Image (spheres, rainbow, N blue to C red):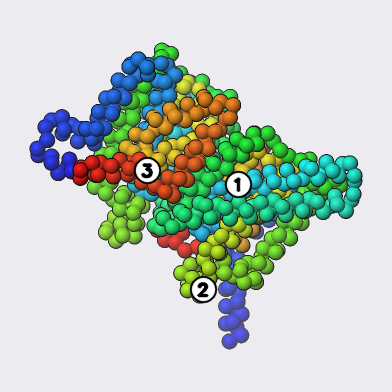
Amino acid sequence: MAMTSSQGLIKIVTRKLKSPPVITITLSIIAAVLASIDSGFYVIVNTIVTGGMWALVAMGLALVFGVMNITSFVHGEFFMIGGLTAYFVFTPFSDYLMDSPNPVVAFFIPILVMLIAAVAGVVVGILSELVIFRPLRKRTSDQWVMNSFVITLGLSVLIVNGTQFIFGTDFRGIVGYWPYPTLSFFNVNISFDRVMVFILAMLILGVFWWFMSASKLGRAIRAVSQDETGARMVGININGIQTLTMALSAALAALAGACLLFMYPAYPTVGMGPLFNSWFIVILAGMGNVGGAAICAFIVALLQVLTTVYFGEGWEFTIPAAVIILVLIIKPSGIFGSSVRGILDQ
Amino acid sequence: MEHVLEKTTMNTFQKTLNALCITPLGFFALVLLLLLPVIPPFNQEYLIRWMVVGLFMAAQAVAFDFTGGYINIVNFGFAAFVGLGAYTSGILCAKLGLSPWIGMFIGIIPAGLVGFLTGILTLRLRGIFAAVMAWFISLAIWGLAIKLVFLTEGPLGLNCPTLLETSSNLPYFYIIFAMFIITYVILKRVVRSNMGLAFTAIGQNMDAARTSGINPVRYRIINFTLSCAFAGWLGGFYAHYYGILMPEIMHTTKTVEVLVIVYLGGRASLWGGAAIAIPFVVAMELVRSEFSNYPGLHFIFYGLFLILIMIYYPGGFAHLYETLTDRFRKL
């Protein structure tokens, strides 16, 4: 008996080791280590720092797809709105701090700014759900996925050009949130902002994880994503959950936009890059797989860092896109697989 | 469908129109359009230029609607297929001295081939997958057009020889008019055939189609490839009309322009998008020139129209026309 159970265990372990997520993660870690031996430790540092942010953006996208079946194209615009809000809130504060320096306030203001940006995201998310997605849902049932996709496209065009109409095409960026000197890890210089932003991203990731797995609302969201009819039967308010999901997803994107304002100055079409990235991530992870998206964010970040290191600037969309297309030839449902109903059945 | 049933009682003219899939009213509109550029208030160069753009959009809308309307897959990389045809033709003519007239047709091959490969890869999955993957592929091609400077001259723009020596827009108007008619007639005839019936069945309910013995993947791939091939051909016109090619023509916004026209015109009609294209393009050009200090203002209309039509009137112009004519007949 003991023999068979240990053999069974070995079988399970080897099967786990052969599973696509483990293989991909191992390969990525090997690639990261080799690349950092070859061209310096900053490869890993850059990957981890940018990966943390893409994880936030991509998780929101995966969530909206999983719960509402919306293939959102407007996610980049939520990112842009976050950045824009952060800019307009932060600049008066930083001007004020110039006149009367105060270290405590200077430390906490950026965090406050990011929270305000997240609130802006919540507002925009709720508005777009109420004004656009709900009326559409009432009128479309059969071809919801394609129709909602097209309508997010329209919304994206509207927001981008509306912003351009109101604010113009100026780049609204900041040099940095925290006026502290650059830190140095293993001979790699990394700005304090990046470290802080990474810590914040991990913190938010943790809170989000807790929210989705332990809290009642998070469970309701997952229930809706698994089985909408079943969720309705046990008395979950579907409309409320859908509004909440949209708000949450937009808030995550806006938060990321605010956090990365020092890297991505806010201008109307800034959302394009984050949108591409988060789509790469979501497709690679398996559409609607929120946990997988968080891990794949780092893989895509690595892919992009490696591309910039070995191919130079300007290739950062082409080569990851090609790699992802290749991966999908082998495994169309994504590395982590998709649990969303009806992705592959048609 | 009525005119099909009455086939025996039709005269030669009606038979020809029926073979070309054009209604009498459509024929009248086309004749009017054909004469429009020589009638005095409309014979100015800038207006003809807008009409050329409008017809180019109309032809693209037909090719786009062939996939988007019938098998219900929005080809989100459509502009890249147009660009692929344009660049193939442009590079062959600019670097190897090929005649643009031949290059235009060679442009069909890469666009159709990439469309075919995309189709094989994604069309066995749910439609949205194909849409997003086509978008990724378009991003990859767009990136290549920017970076392969030795071939494409990158963002500076590739100078391609034009189709004709003349600087007048009028001959180009008739060329694109002919191309539009060819695109429309071929695709409409496909749609009217048994294959078109299969497309509609797949677009409406894939499982039901499969149960009726239709192989959805095969038909979807045929449809997608055909649409992409026409996109490549039209791209060839673009290259040799403007005489300069920039990677921008593959940008997602170009797909959006076509998509908005198709949705406004009415999905799964082929003619709806085409009918709306010229008035829409002219109106947008007017907005653009009128409010030239607000670049991108016309795109607000694109977004707004798309959202409104999707929520409140998904049938678009074609549906409006049909309801109106039905009501008219009842009177």
Of discs 1 and 3, which sits in the foreground? 3
Q: Residue at x 28, y 39 (%)?
A: B188
The percent coordinates of residue B16 (x first, y second) are: 18, 31
Amino acid tagged 2? Gly
Mark closer to the chain start, 1 or 2? 1
**Mark 3 to mark 2 CA distance (whole Å):** 38 Å
Q: Quadrant of the C terminus of chain A?
A: bottom left
Q: Which residue is mark 2?
A: A235
As drawn, A166 above or below B202: above
Q: Which residue is mark 3?
A: B316
Furthest residue toward bottom: A1
Residue A199 sits in quarter: bottom right
**Host chain of mark 2:** A
**Host chain of mark 1:** A
Q: Is residue B291 left or right of residue A107?
A: left
Q: Residue at x 30, y 30 (%)?
A: B181
**Would residue B219 be seen by someone viewing this image from the given angle?**
yes
The percent coordinates of residue A227 (x first, y second) are: 49, 68
Label 3 SS: helix
**Mark 1 to mark 3 CA distance (whole Å):** 28 Å
Q: Which residue is mark 1?
A: A76
Q: Dot 2 surroundings within 10 Å: few (below 14), some, or many (20 or more)?
A: few
1 and 2 marks in contact (CB < 8 Å): no
Furthest residue toward front: B331
Q: Is residue B3 left or right of residue B35?
A: left
The percent coordinates of residue A52 (x first, y second) are: 70, 54
